[in-house]
Image: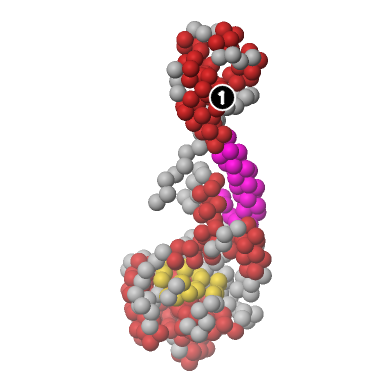
């Protein structure tokens, strides 16, 4: 490892040392100028750090003070190197300040700081941003922003204003975290096993988040829970990281049915889309609807089918077109027991299908 180079705040000129030495010995400058046969003005310029120590002056100082000429020459060389390093440091610092000013236009640095990702070092912070965004310059960062700001998966929310900078920052942070995760080898043939294990977990509703991670990691899928950023109403995100698919959820709605559907939705992207194209990614800002892309509809259907077959759901919904607290809720619980799923998942789908999210229920939707 290369040793860290320490640069002084100010460079020390050999004239400063000479001044201290003369004062310590009680020698006056005019007297000393005469001793070394130097014009008093030249000596004064040396002491005031306006003149360099030459080899000739170094020899004169050696004879007059007994301090080796090599010392004075090395001190002069060190001073000049320090001056050059300080100048370089100041130029670099100015450049870093300019770069950081540009970074703040494209990156949610305040959020990253609150998450403890940034320090008091501007150089370290710039390096951290480059690492998170997988770029090495401000030009590449701007290019990354330009490429992603109009991506189709940034679906507009009718209720919330989306901040594209925060959304991209959130997704880049998720990718950055995923790179450091190590899980088992992924095998697409484990699809049914994964779905079945998750359904059992969701129905039991015990230690759900941690156990979801264990199940997915065991089967080669990375899993991250990452809180959404301001004006970034993201539910889930799926992409390929190294040799493994990755699922990220925000848990904006801390409800079992929402969590379960989001995980299954992202699994739908994994098995339906990401296996075929590992360069794709899917950032889901809201549940798919009639205007959603075909791929979002695919993932939506995948999640629905994981819990209830269409025919079973249609039969239930036809009997309950309007929500009746006693009868509809009773049927939800009965159907959930028959299909071995948690009743809140049926309730959540009913709210979505009817577009009525204000329905009151005694079914516990809390995620445990």
Identify the image's colour scheme: rainbow, by chain, secondary structure or one colour.
Answer: secondary structure
Q: Looking at the image, which residue is at 62% across and 62% down?
A: 140
Secondary structure at numbered mark 1: helix
- Left or right: where does residue 330 sit relative to residue 320? left
Residue 278 seen in the figure: yes
What span is colored magenta in the figure? 83-110
Relative to 134, residue 87 above or below? above
Tag 1 residue: 56
- Left or right: where does residue 166 sit relative to residue 198? right
Q: Looking at the image, which residue is at 54% across and 56% down?
A: 129
Who is closer to the viewer here, 329 or 312?
312
Relative to 212, residue 74 above or below? above
Q: How far across and down, in percent of the image, does residue 335 sit? A: 40, 84
- Left or right: where does residue 51 sit relative to residue 302? right
Who is closer to the viewer here, 104 or 282?
104
Quadrant of res 43: top right
């Amino acid at each position: 490892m290369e040793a860290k180079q320490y640069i002084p705040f100010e460079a020390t000129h050999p004239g400063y040392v000479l001044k201290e030495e003369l004062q310590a010995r009680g020698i006056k400058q005019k007297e000393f100028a005469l001793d070394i046969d130097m014009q008093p003005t030249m000596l004064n310029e040396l002491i005031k750090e306006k003149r360099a120590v030459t080899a000739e002056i170094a020899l004169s100082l050696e004879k007059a003070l007994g301090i080796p000429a090599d010392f004075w020459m090395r001190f002069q060389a060190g001073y000049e190197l320090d001056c050059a390093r300080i100048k370089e440091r100041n130029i670099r610092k100015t450049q870093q300040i300019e770069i950081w000013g540009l970074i703040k236009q494209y990156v949610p640095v305040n959020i990253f700081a609150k998450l403890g990702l940034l320090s008091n070092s501007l150089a370290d912070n710039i390096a951290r941003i480059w690492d998170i965004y997988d770029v090495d310059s401000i030009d590449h960062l701007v290019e990354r922003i330009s490429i992603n700001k109009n991506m189709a998966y940034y679906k507009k929310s009718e209720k919330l204003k989306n901040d594209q900078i925060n959304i991209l920052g959130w997704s880049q942070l998720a990718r950055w975290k995923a790179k450091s995760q190590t899980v088992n080898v992924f095998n697409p043939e484990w699809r049914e096993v994964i779905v079945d294990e998750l359904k059992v977990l969701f129905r039991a509703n015990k230690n759900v988040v941690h156990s979801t991670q264990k199940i997915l990691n065991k089967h080669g899928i990375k899993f991250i829970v990452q809180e959404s950023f301001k004006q970034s109403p993201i539910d889930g995100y799926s992409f390929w990281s190294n040799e493994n698919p990755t699922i990220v959820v925000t848990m904006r709605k801390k409800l079992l049915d929402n969590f379960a559907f989001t995980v299954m939705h992202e699994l739908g992207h994994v098995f339906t889309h990401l296996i075929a194209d590992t360069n794709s990614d899917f950032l889901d800002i809201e549940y798919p609807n009639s205007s959603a892309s075909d791929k979002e509809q695919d993932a939506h259907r995948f999640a629905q089918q994981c819990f209830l077959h269409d025919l079973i759901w249609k039969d239930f919904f036809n009997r309950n077109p309007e929500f009746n607290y006693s009868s509809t809720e009773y049927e939800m619980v009965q159907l959930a027991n028959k299909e071995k799923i948690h009743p809140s998942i049926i309730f959540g789908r009913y709210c979505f299908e009817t577009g009525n999210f204000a329905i009151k229920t005694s079914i516990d939707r809390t995620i445990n």
